[in-house]
Amino acid sequence: MTILIPEEYPKKLIDKNGKRLDGRALDELRPFSCKIGVLANADGSAYVEHGKNKIYAGVYGPREVHPRHLARPDRGIIRVDYRMTTFSVHERKSPAPNRREREISKIIEDALAPTLFLELYPNSAIEVYVQVIAADGGTRCASTTAASLALADAGLPLKSLVAAVAAGKADGEIILDLGDLEDKAGTADVPAAVRMIDEEFTLLQFDGEMTPEEFEKSIKLIKKGAREIFAKQTAAIKEKFDTVRKETEEENKKIEKLVPPEEKITHASGTKEEEKAGEEKSDKAEEIKEEKEDPSDTKEEEKKPKKEKEEKKSEENK
Ligand code: UDP
C-alpha cells in the first residue's frame, strides 16, 4: 500500500463509465464477509472483513460494573472499547487510546443500545471489545456490524441485529460504502447504523456538503447496503448453529453406541423368573426387617402373657 498525502489524491475518483477506482459501481458494497464464535475465551465474538478492514469483536457479560459508580440500579449499561492496533494503518498508530477511539467507542455504544433489553440487567454491564487489525475507511461502521454479531453470538436476547455502512459523495456522485481514499478525498461522508428489524437508524453522522435530495439518496443507498450486510450476518449465525447442531448430533450418535440397548441390561441381571424370585425374596426380607424395626409392638406382645399370668395367679390366691 502506498502512503498518499492530500496533494497526491487522484484527481478523479469516478471514471467516465461511472466506475470507482476499485472498479465498483456507485451503489456497490466492498467485498464483505463475517463469522461468529471466533474467539474461544469471550462470551460471544465475531470477525468481519469489510473491504480491507479486518475487525474482531468480543463480548463479556452481563457482569458486575467496574468502576461501580457507573452502575445503574434500574438497568444494565453497554460499554464499548474500540481500538485500532498499532499496525492497522499506514502510519504507526500510538498504542495509547486517543480521543478518536473514545468517540467511536461511544458512537458504537449508542448504535447498539437500542437493540438490547438493558432493563433486564440492573447493576450490570455488557462489555464489547473491538480490535481493528487492518483499517481501510469506515471502521466505525464495520466495527458496529461486528459488535452486533458478537452480541448475538453471546446469546443475549436482541431486538434486532444492526448493520452499518456509510454513503458519501465523490466527483458530484452519491456513492455507497466509501473506502479509505474516497473517505479522505471525497466531499461528504455519512456513516450510519441501521436496526434491521424496523430499519430505524441508530447511528447517523454527517461530514461534508450535500443537497437534501442527495442526502435522501444517501439514506436509500445506506438501507440497500445494510440489507446486503444483514443477509450475510444472518447467514453467519445460521452457519454457526448448523455446525453446532451437526456436532451435537454426531456426539449423540457416539453416546448411543456406548450405551447398551435395553434388552442387554435385562439379560445382564438375569432371566425374568430370576428377577421375580429376587423381588419375592426382597419382599420377605422387608417384612422381617419391619418386624425387627418395631420394638414397641414386640415388647407389648411379650408383656401380654406375663400380665395375664399375673392376673390369673392373683385370682387363684384370692
Ligand atoms: N486512519 C488512519 N490513522 C488513524 C485513524 C484513521 O490512517 O489514526 C484511517 C483509517 O483507514 C480509517 C480512515 O482513516 O478507516 C478513516 O478514519 P475515520 O476517523 O473517518 O473513521 P472510520 O471511517 O474508520 O470510521
Image (cartoon, grey):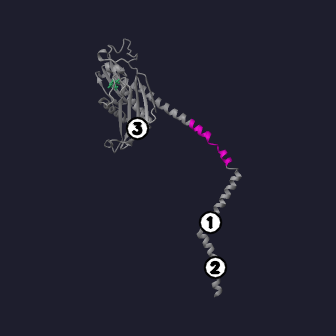
User: Tag 3's secondary structure?
Assistant: strand
User: Which residue sits furthest bottom?
Assistant: 318
**Residue beneath label 1, please?**
292
Residue 159 appears in view: no
Whether residues under marks 2 and 3 lie with C-beta atoms below 8 angstroms apart, the answer is no
Mark nearer the viewer, 2 or 3:
3
* Main SS class of the magenta portion in the image: helix
Q: Earlier in the sequence, mark 3 or mark 1?
A: 3
| Label 1, label 2: how far apart the Cα atoms are | 24 Å
Quadrant that contains the N terminus: top left
Q: Position of residue 108 (x, y in %)?
A: 35, 32
Amino acid type, residue under disc 1 in the picture: Lys
**Which quadrant of the structure image shows residue 23?**
top left
Give me the residue at 65% from left, 46% from top. Answer: 265
Give me the residue at 70% from left, 55% from top. Answer: 277
Is residue 266 part of the magenta span, yes or no? Answer: yes
Q: Earlier in the sequence, mark 1 or mark 2?
A: 1
Displayed-image quarter of ligand 1 = top left
Q: Say which mark, if any, is on residue 60.
A: 3
User: Which residue sits furthest top?
Assistant: 16
> Relative to 188, does residue 162 appear above or below in the rendering?
below
**Taking 31 as reference, is 300 left or right?**
right
Judge the density around disc 2: few (<14), some (14-19), many (≥20) Cα neighbours within 10 Å: few
Give me the residue at 52% from left, 32% from top. Answer: 243
Q: Earlier in the sequence, mark 2 or mark 3?
A: 3
Of residues 137 and 25, the one nearer the viewer is 137
Whether residues under marks 1 and 2 lie with C-beta atoms below 8 angstroms apart, the answer is no
Q: Position of residue 44 (x, y in %)?
A: 43, 35
Is residue 306 part of the magenta span, yes or no? Answer: no
Q: Position of residue 107 (x, y in %)?
A: 33, 32
Quadrant that contains the C terminus: bottom right
Of residues 41 and 160, the one nearer the viewer is 41
